[in-house]
Amino acid sequence: MASKTFFCIDAHTCGNPVRLVAGGGPLLKGNNMSEKRQHFLQEFDWIRKGLMFEPRGHDMMSGSILYPPHDPENDIGVLFIETSGCLPMCGHGTIGTVTIMIEEGLVIPKVPGQLRLETPAGLVKVTYTQEGKKVKSVKLVNVPSYLAAENIQVECPDLGLITVDVAYGGNFYAIVDVQSNFKGLEHYTAADLIRWSPVVRERINAAHTFVHPENPTIKGLSHLLWTGATISPEATARNAVFYGDKAIDRSPCGTGTSARMAQWHAKGKLKKGDRFVHESIIGSQFIGTVEDEVTLGGHKAMIPGIEGWAKIYGHNTITIDPEDDPYAYGFLVK
């Protein structure tokens, strides 16, 4: 394969990276972003690995690629890539991508201050506030989210038997609430969570099947959400989301916040109109809202709103050259 060059803009959303591929993304087949995601996975996953993995990326690297919309009423299509895979949806990635698109003039919104994004998980509506050239905040109205399973027991290294709920917020999350064998994330190191999470995820996936009720290509538990006491008194809850092989989300995680709000909503702890301030492992915050109450494939579900901010910090021209570089397609150190 010949050398391939990608023009990227780098940013972070509340501490977690977003690398938007502004040029060089592959042409994909499909009538929607879900079908395009399948084509990408089949033929172009080497791009994700080359741009997200070391030496061009790192364990936490996350990004996106832009595509023309399929519906002329919408503004843009977005494909999400990160170390953990080509995701159906990414909340922090959406906030970062929108910030980059607007500040860099990559997309001219049909309606100023609003965007309609086609994602593999479905349509995501966005509003943003802007001061001069800077985007100060982005709010996305995410896809329907729901509690998929409750009280799953799994053996965790060092901790012993723990109980988790599994919720969907664009990806499937195992949520580890505070319990007798887990005192809260503040009592453990990030290294502990990184060591335990892959084992717990593998054991849950071996014993249980999770499939989106309307899109069978969205399946499998991919993330773990560990909970704990908040740092700020204004925060509703705090989390540390594990993804990939060794990553802890530095942001509060958009689809993770959606999943946790869906869990709380299903248990009667949140209702339409409620506000949910979610805090990350480093203390950054997303403002969550319960936008609506719906059903999804027979499940009680809710529509989450997620608001946060992002900052652009660099422009990259990145080359993947398999004829010259033995690490063209990246690597992971486990």
Image (cartoon, helix red, strand yellow):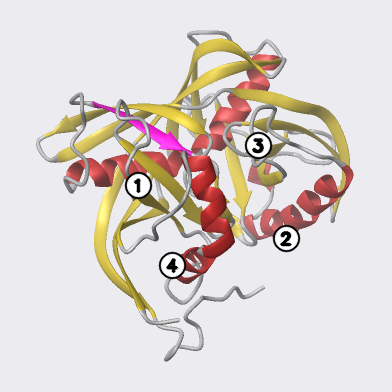
Q: How far apart are marks 1 and 3 (CA)?
A: 35 Å
Question: Which residue has dot 2 on it?
Answer: 195
Figure label count: 4
- Which element is circle 4 on? helix
Label 4 vs label 2, nearer the camera: 4
- Which element is circle 3 on? strand
At label 3, the amino acid type is Thr
Label 2 vs label 1, nearer the camera: 1
Label 3 vs label 4, nearer the camera: 4
Q: How far apart are marks 4 and 1 (CA)?
A: 18 Å
What secondary structure is the stretch in magenta mostly built from?
strand
**Image position of 64 (left or right of 173):** left
Dividing the picture into quadrants, the one containing residue 111 is top left
Q: Distance between the residues labelled 3 and 4?
A: 30 Å
Tell which circle, 1 or 3, labels the residue nearer the N-terminal end.
1
| Pick the front one: 264 or 21 | 21
Q: Distance between the residues labelled 4 and 2?
A: 25 Å
The residue positioned 18% from the left and 48% from the top of the image is 104
**Image position of 132 (left or right of 245):** left
Tell which circle, 3 or 2, labels the residue nearer the N-terminal end.
2
Question: Which residue has dot 4 on it?
Answer: 51
Q: Which residues make up the magenta segment?
A: 114-119
- Badge 2, how many Cα within 10 Å: few under 14, some, many 20+? some
Question: Which residue has dot 3 on it?
Answer: 227
Tell me if label 3 and label 4 are in contact, CB under 8 Å. Answer: no
Dividing the picture into quadrants, the one containing residue 93 is top left
Question: Which residue has dot 1 on it?
Answer: 67
The residue positioned 47% from the left and 38% from the top of the image is 32
